[in-house]
Every structure is written in structure tokens, then in C-alpha cells.
Image: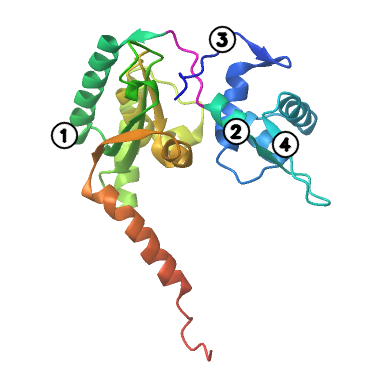
């Protein structure tokens, strides 16, 4: 297995910041194929800029156009998969990584036991260079967590969420987006788990599931609720597939 790829946080590809390119590739790698509108949405750029970026990806072998006649879509390459998992962080010792992981799991227990947090951690996964036992110097500890609301009723969750929003504003936190207010029950928990640790790289498992599942990983926590989620998804699909009432065929 190759060592984790490292990138210069101040570097560029075809004039575009490496960190911006990595962000884009992490999103595109989850798509079977994508178009210019996808790039526009991920990076919040216009059509002309999106086309320039796609041309840069093609020139560097990170994407390729689909050959179907009349198609204006692209796919990412294996090189893009590798680049998306690259790190820009300074290396740390395994001892530092172990301490960071222990502190992180302590915060997970705190979240799940403290009623002030409106989210609970249902899954914790570690991946990346931490799993390489032959390495003494690591890029960081790559983690993915899955969060679920502690309150099932949406109305109750929303009321409690806005109480937390008000409390955070009184403490000086500024919300610039309406969506951040609505999702504060989740964002606040995520921020606490991360705790500005430079040794922890934290992903939202629900958003990055395809990426995390396809690389070597180890599950450190998986609650019964998380284990039942795939079954619930299948049952929802079955219900939607049932024949409508009164259907003659």
C-alpha cells in the first residue's frame, strides 16, 4: 500500500488552489458522472469559470469526458480518487495520534450523555494513515462520524434547536446563513467533536459514505440504530413500490 499522498496547502493546479481542487474532487468522486452545473454548485462559480476548471482537470488527468454522443458530462479518474484523499496537514507522531483519538472518543461519550447536545453519535469510523501500523509519522487521524437527532419529533427538535441558536448568539456566535440556524443541532455537535484539533480530520459519514466505504477503514462505534438504518431504507423502498389502492394490475 502506498503512503498517503501529501499536498502543499499553498500549491496550485493549472492556477487553481489545490485545496479548492481537492474539495471539488471529493464531491465529484461520489457522482457516476457530472456536468458543468455540478461544478458550479460545489464551488459557487459561474459557467465560464466552471468550464475552465473542468479543462484543468482534464489536462492533469483528474477527469475525462464521457464518450457518449451528444454527452456533455465527465467522470473522475483513479488519480482523482487518490488526490481526493490527500492531506495538507503537517505530519504527527503516532503517540500524538493515539492521544488525539482517545480525546476524540471521550468527546463522543460526552455528546451522547449530555442532554445539551441535540445530536447523538451513532457511528465512528477511522481510516487513512492511522491504520498503517508500520508508520511512525502520520498525516493526521482521519475520522468519519454519523449523527442522528436525539429527539425524533421534528417540531420538538426544531424548538430545542432554536433555543440553542439563541444561547449561542448570546455567547457571541454569529450565523450568516439561515441553513446554519436550522442545522445548528448538528453543526454544534460536529464542531465540538472536532474541537479545532489539528490532529483530527473529521468527515460527515452520511455525506461522504461512498468515499469512506471504498477506502480501508475500521468501525470504532456502530449503535443498534445505525445498524438498522439500511433495513429501514429497504422497507421504505418496499412501501413506495407497493401497488396503489385500487390498482387493477
Q: Which mark is residue 194?
A: none
- Which badge, 2 or 4, comes first in the chain's sequence? 4
- Which badge, 1 or 2, comes first in the chain's sequence? 2
- Which badge, 4 or 1, comes first in the chain's sequence? 4
Q: Residue at x 77, y 28 (%)?
A: 55
Measured Cα–Cα span from mark 3 to mark 4: 24 Å
Q: Is residue 75 magenta?
A: no
Q: Specify few, some or many for label 4: CA neighbours under 10 Å numbering under 14, 14-19, or 20 or more.
A: some
Q: Residue 207: horizontal and vertical position, in percent?
A: 46, 39
Q: Residue 244: horizontal and vertical position, in percent?
A: 48, 81
Measured Cα–Cα span from mark 2 to mark 4: 11 Å
- Seen in the picture, residue 70 relative to 146 is either above or below; the reply is below
Q: Specify few, some or many for label 2: CA neighbours under 10 Å numbering under 14, 14-19, or 20 or more.
A: few
Q: Which residue is mark 1?
A: 113
Q: Residue at x 34, y 51 (%)?
A: 154
Q: Which residue is mark 4?
A: 64
Measured Cα–Cα span from mark 4 to mark 1: 48 Å
**Label 2 residue SS:** helix
Q: Residue furthest right?
A: 70
Q: Specify few, some or many for label 3: CA neighbours under 10 Å numbering under 14, 14-19, or 20 or more.
A: some
- Which badge, 2 or 3, comes first in the chain's sequence? 3
Q: Which residue is mark 3?
A: 8
Amino acid at each position: 500500500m502506498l503512503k498517503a499522498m501529501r499536498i502543499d496547502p499553498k500549491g496550485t493546479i493549472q492556477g487553481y488552489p489545490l485545496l479548492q481542487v481537492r474539495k471539488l474532487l471529493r464531491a465529484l468522486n461520489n457522482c457516476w458522472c457530472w456536468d458543468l452545473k455540478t461544478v458550479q454548485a460545489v464551488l459557487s462559480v459561474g459557467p465560464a469559470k466552471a468550464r475552465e476548471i473542468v479543462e484543468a482537470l482534464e489536462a492533469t488527468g483528474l477527469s475525462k469526458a464521457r464518450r457518449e454522443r451528444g454527452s456533455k458530462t465527465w467522470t473522475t479518474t483513479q488519480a482523482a480518487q487518490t488526490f481526493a484523499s490527500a492531506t495538507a496537514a503537517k505530519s504527527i507522531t503516532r503517540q500524538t495520534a493515539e492521544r488525539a483519538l482517545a480525546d476524540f472518543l471521550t468527546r463522543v461519550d460526552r455528546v451522547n450523555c449530555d442532554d445539551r447536545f441535540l445530536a447523538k453519535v451513532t457511528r465512528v469510523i477511522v481510516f487513512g494513515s492511522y491504520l498503517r501500523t508500520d508508520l511512525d509519522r502520520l498525516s493526521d487521524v482521519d475520522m468519519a462520524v454519523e449523527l442522528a437527532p436525539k429527539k425524533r419529533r421534528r417540531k420538538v427538535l426544531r424548538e430545542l434547536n432554536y433555543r440553542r441558536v439563541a444561547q449561542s448568539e448570546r455567547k457571541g456566535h454569529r450565523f450568516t446563513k439561515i441553513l446554519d440556524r436550522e442545522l445548528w443541532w448538528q453543526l454544534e455537535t460536529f464542531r465540538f467533536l472536532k474541537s479545532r484539533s489539528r490532529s483530527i480530520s473529521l468527515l460527515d459519514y452520511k455525506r461522504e459514505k461512498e468515499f469512506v466505504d471504498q477506502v480501508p477503514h475500521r468501525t470504532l462505534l456502530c449503535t443498534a440504530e445505525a445498524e438498522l438504518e439500511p433495513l429501514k431504507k429497504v422497507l421504505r423502498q418496499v412501501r413506495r413500490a407497493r401497488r396503489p389502492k385500487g390498482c387493477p394490475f
